[in-house]
Amino acid sequence: MDDEGIALADLNQPTLDRWLCQGKQHRRDIRQFMQGAHRHKLARRLDVPRSRVEQPSVFIEDDERLQQLRRCVEDETIPLAARVVGSLVLLLGLQISKILRLTTEDVSLNGSTVRLHLNDHHVDLPPRISALVGQRLEQAEAAWENNRTASTTPWLFPGHNPARPLGLQSIHIQLRKHDLKGLAGRNTARLALAANVPASILAEVTGTSVSNATRWATLAKRDWTGYISSRRIGG
């Protein structure tokens, strides 16, 4: 609009359509802005197609996912934070960014079992992963005691700045260094879960929307072994 000297109130459908067609798919993200501008009487009613929901495109074989999960549990040469994050990604299909936002208050002990509080849903972890998360919890609680004046949040994965959680880039570097496939492992874990639990439970555990969980469930109903083989990552 700046380039062509058009005010928002004067924007019309042909001009908007031309701009949408000349750019990449993400230009459709303007849909909510245009709807809000119309509601507040700042622009006329204009149509912006919804962005196409992309199918997940990177996977690993489920056997490889289980091998990587075993390494996270057993390999003490991998940093503890990466082992815990990797375990939760490969077991529960969680987003790494959401794992890093966990606090010590999101973890509770039920005897020897560790319970995670995820999106108002409680998940009891298997014994060996419970032990791993328990170690992380002990370290985080000790760090919290030492840094109460520097942080108001008891992060489960505190960063170099105690007021903030461990950075996403930092944990990605650790995972890549030890050949742990974050996104591919998460996708494969979600697919395995979607084949065994209702979409509503998958949504609660992973923190995704019910509609997204339903798409995973639909994908899982296919012959997904062949699907993974055709779309698995290299290496």
Image: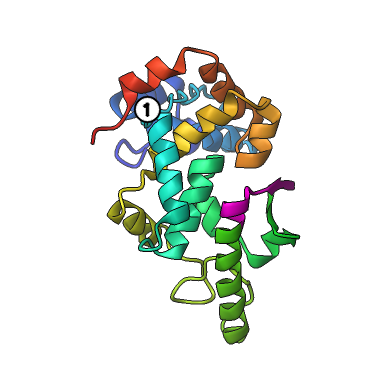
Which quarter of the picture shows residue 146?
A: bottom right
Q: Position of residue 51 (x, y in %)?
A: 46, 26
Q: Quadrant of the rendered structure where residue 80 is?
A: bottom left
From what the image shows, is residue 213 above or below residue 142? above
The quarter of the displayed image where residue 232 is located: top left
Within 10 Å of disc 1 (Cα), the crowding (few <14, some 14-19, many 20+) is some
Q: Residue at x 41, y 50 (%)?
A: 71
* Residue 62 drawn at (x, y percent): 43, 30
Secondary element at image label 1? loop
Q: Position of residue 84 (x, y in %)?
A: 50, 57
User: Magenta region: which residues?
Assistant: 120-130
Q: Residue at x 69, y 33 (%)?
A: 201
In this figure, which residue is indicated by the disc labeled 1? Answer: 57
Q: Work out which quarter of the rendered image holds the N terminus and state it.
A: top left
Residue at 55% x, 51% y is 98
Q: Is residue 188 magenta?
A: no
- The residue nearer to you, when weighing 8 against 227, is 227
Answer left or right for 128 relative to 119.
Answer: left
Q: Is residue 24 left or right of residue 119?
A: left
Q: Position of residue 197 (x, y in %)?
A: 66, 27
Q: Quadrant of the C terminus?
A: top left
Picture layout, residue 95 above or below residue 153: above
Q: Is residue 151 visible?
A: no
Identity, as a three-letter code, of the amino acid under mark 1: Ser
Does the magenta-highlighted stretch encompass residue 121?
A: yes
Residue 182 is at least partly visible in this image: yes
